[in-house]
Image: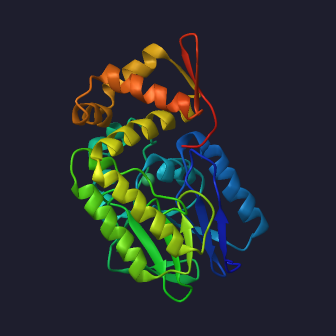
């Protein structure tokens, strides 16, 4: 399905997928996975370069700065010569390492400090491997996210804006309905670009774009019609994400995480629930879904799937 000079790596949760694009001399990388998988990220690249010894690393591009997409930046920058590109609106926050503006604290997720050297500017073009991609702003799942589109191959790097079945959580939808409107506009943009192949941030590449868009619009309708569903979904996704990287956590630590994570507080306040009530609701949901087990005083992750 993909030309030989595009190497797609479907990473397991918690890491987002990675892509290697190369021309005769240089290798460019899209996204870098989650920090607890950083060694694996480095090894994947080393093993690829071992097979293609004529290639030297050139650029690292981040579609958006969620910790599962840029958590390996630090490790890659330590070991390889790379120019790191982030979406234009993130350049200053990364330069100042402003964790509040970057949103890592807001979501209760770790991300090792890294250096951004260049910006991805919506409306401009960028060379990635042997191709030239259009850069488009796609707020919604993440307010500063971009997607990358190569018109000749009709190939879209969709990050978490569109997956084969759904899209990433709308975190901003808790406090501001514009999150839903922006996600809808971003999905409409994909509809307009009319890509033939999509390389998503999670899951396999896919070509049935119409079905994916239909399912994404219907999911968005469902969340937008009742923002309480979105607030619960955000709490469930973030707690499960934390459980996936901690593996297990005591009741007391889980309670502290609920209390200290700003977006969880916003979700509780939107739902008019106390933190404890939201925690109980979230626990019950994850247990019923079979993705978390509770034994004695400990919550344990079951299945690495969100
Ligand atoms: Zn994301």
Q: Position of residue 256 (x, y in %)?
A: 37, 20
| Looking at the image, residue 120 lies above or below residue 297 | below
Q: Quadrant of residue 219?
A: bottom left
Q: Which of 216 and 109 lies nearest the eye of the viewer?
A: 216
Whether residue 141 appears in this view of the structure is no
Residue at horizontal 55%, vertical 81%? 196
279 to 229, vertically: above or below: above
Identify the residue shown where x is 45% and y is 61%: 62
Q: Quadrant of the N terminus?
A: bottom right
Q: Can residue 195 be seen from the camera position used here?
A: yes
In this rendering, the answer to whether 236 lies above or below 159 is: above
User: Where residue 259 appears, x then y in whole percent?
Assistant: 32, 23
Q: Position of residue 158 (x, y in %)?
A: 48, 67
Q: Residue placed farthest to the right in the image?
A: 51
**Farthest residue, direction top:** 296
Which residue is found at the position 58% from the left and 82% from the top?
Answer: 130
Q: Quadrant of residue 190?
A: bottom left
Residue 127 shown left or right of residue 185 in the figure? right
Q: Nearer the viewer, residue 78 or 251?
A: 251
Horizontal side of 163 relative to 64 (left or right) equals right
How many numbered dots are placed on residues in this image? 0
Between residue 137 and residue 37, name the one nearer to us: 137
On-image quarter of the C terminus:
top right
Q: Going by the image, does 267 lie left or right of 289?
A: left
């Amino acid at each position: 399905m993909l030309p030989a000079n595009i190497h797609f790596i479907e990473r397991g949760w918690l890491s987002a997928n990675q892509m290697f694009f190369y021309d005769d001399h240089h290798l460019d990388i899209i996204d870098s996975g989650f920090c607890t998988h950083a060694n694996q990220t480095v090894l994947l690249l080393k093993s690829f370069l071992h097979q293609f010894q004529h290639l030297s690393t050139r650029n690292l591009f981040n579609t958006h700065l969620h910790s599962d997409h840029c958590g390996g930046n630090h490790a890659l920058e330590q070991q390889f010569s790379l120019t790191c590109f982030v979406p234009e609106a993130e350049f200053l926050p990364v330069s100042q390492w402003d964790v509040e503006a970057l949103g890592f604290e807001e979501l209760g997720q770790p991300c090792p400090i890294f250096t951004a050297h260049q910006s991805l500017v919506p409306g401009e073009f960028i060379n990635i491997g042997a191709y030239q991609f259009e850069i488009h702003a796609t707020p919604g799942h993440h307010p500063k996210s971009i997607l990358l589109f190569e018109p000749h191959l009709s190939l879209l790097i969709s990050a978490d804006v569109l997956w084969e079945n759904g899209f990433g959580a709308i975190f901003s939808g808790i406090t501001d309905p514009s999150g839903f409107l922006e996600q809808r506009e971003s999905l409409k943009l994909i509809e307009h670009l009319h890509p033939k192949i999509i390389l998503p941030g999670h899951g396999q590449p896919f070509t049935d774009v119409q079905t994916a868009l239909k399912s994404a619009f219907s999911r968005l309708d469902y969340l937008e019609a009742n923002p309480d569903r979105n607030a619960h979904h955000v709490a469930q996704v973030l707690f499960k994400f934390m459980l996936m990287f901690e593996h297990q956590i005591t009741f007391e630590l889980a309670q502290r995480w609920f209390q200290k994570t700003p977006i969880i507080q916003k979700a509780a306040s939107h739902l008019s629930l106390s933190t404890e009530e939201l925690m109980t609701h979230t626990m019950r949901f994850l247990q019923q879904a079979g993705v978390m087990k509770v034994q004695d005083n400990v919550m344990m992750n079951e299945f690495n799937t969100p």
